[in-house]
Amino acid sequence: MIKSPAPFKASNLNVRHGFFSRLGGVSTGRYAELNGGATTDDDPAAIKENRRLMAQYFDVTDAKFLALKQVHGREVFVVRDETPLWPLSSLPEADGLVTNVPNLVLTITTADCAPVLFSSGDGKIIGAAHAGWRGAVNGILEETMHQMRSLGATNIKAAIGPCIGPKSYEISANMRDEVLEKHPKAGDFFKALKQERQFMFDLPGFCVQCLTQNGVDSVENLALDTVSDDRFFSYRRSFLAGNSATGRQVSAIQLRNIAL
């Protein structure tokens, strides 16, 4: 029997959480092993079992291991006591989750985009966000913090999990211009290459700036590069190898009821 996989953790978050790798699941082939992406073309039974294994790490059923249909936007879904839980077959479209409901696990899936987990200082409100470059530029991190504050969160802490690193993210000048149009002070996160109008982009560094400018109490970047580290799924690594199909690793956080 496969045991619950052990995730990476941040030192600054005061609630149960984890950034899972691709290791420790039941998927095979291009999706091996711990693919948690419900919208991938992997075997649905394997995805369900992988998510059950990760839910087991948090001592909950997979029904409380909540996921989203991520669309690279800035919509944040707030889960309240009265919110009906949804199955994998009917995911709400959003790129952030926030709750103050105990025992639920908020999850984000990524394969190069930045997963960001949040906790209020008192550990009573949590959040999770999927921050690809477009979502980060358009304010998904700020909106997640806004929704947490609307529930009463203060002294918010954040952690950035495995994502494409600054030495792996080559982009065009058009993308750089799009970022700088909305974030004129983000120029330090681009490094020009010898090729004309090509740059390297520091996505996690940019996310740190977005968080600090929005008053986060502390932020930790795990500095795990999904492209260069094959313990993680990477869309870019797969694409460069001639195959864009890849799985998604899961980042998860739980507001735990001590009476559970």
Image: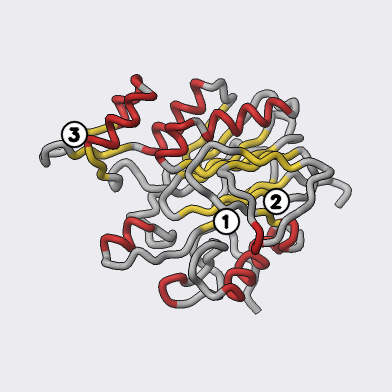
- Between circles 1 and 2, the one closer to the viewer is 2
Q: Please state if 88 lies on the left or on the right of 10 as rendered.
A: right
Residue drawn where x is 55% and y is 69% of the image = 24
- Amino acid type, residue under disc 1 in the picture: Pro
The mark found on residue 158 in the picture is: none
Label 1: which secondary element: loop
Q: How is the image coloured?
A: secondary structure
Q: For label 3, count other residues whose C-alpha is less than 10 Å away and answer few (under 14), some (14-19) or many (20+).
A: some
Q: Return the residue found at the far bottom.
A: 1
Q: Residue 241: percent from the left, percent from the top?
A: 27, 65
Q: Which residue is mark 3?
A: 192
Q: Which residue is mark 1?
A: 7
Q: Residue 224: percent from the left, percent from the top?
A: 42, 48
Q: Which residue is mark 2?
A: 105
Q: Please state if 257 lies on the left or on the right of 73 as rendered.
A: right
Between residues 200 and 20, which one lies in front from this camera angle? 200
Q: Which numbered disc, 2 or 3, marks the residue that appears first in the sequence?
A: 2
Label 2: which secondary element: strand
Q: Residue 107: percent from the left, percent from the top?
A: 62, 51
Q: CA distance from mark 1 to mark 2?
A: 14 Å
Residue drawn where x is 35% and y is 63% of the image = 244
Residue drawn where x is 74% and y is 29% of the image = 151
Q: For label 1, count other residues whose C-alpha is less than 10 Å away and answer few (under 14), some (14-19) or many (20+).
A: some
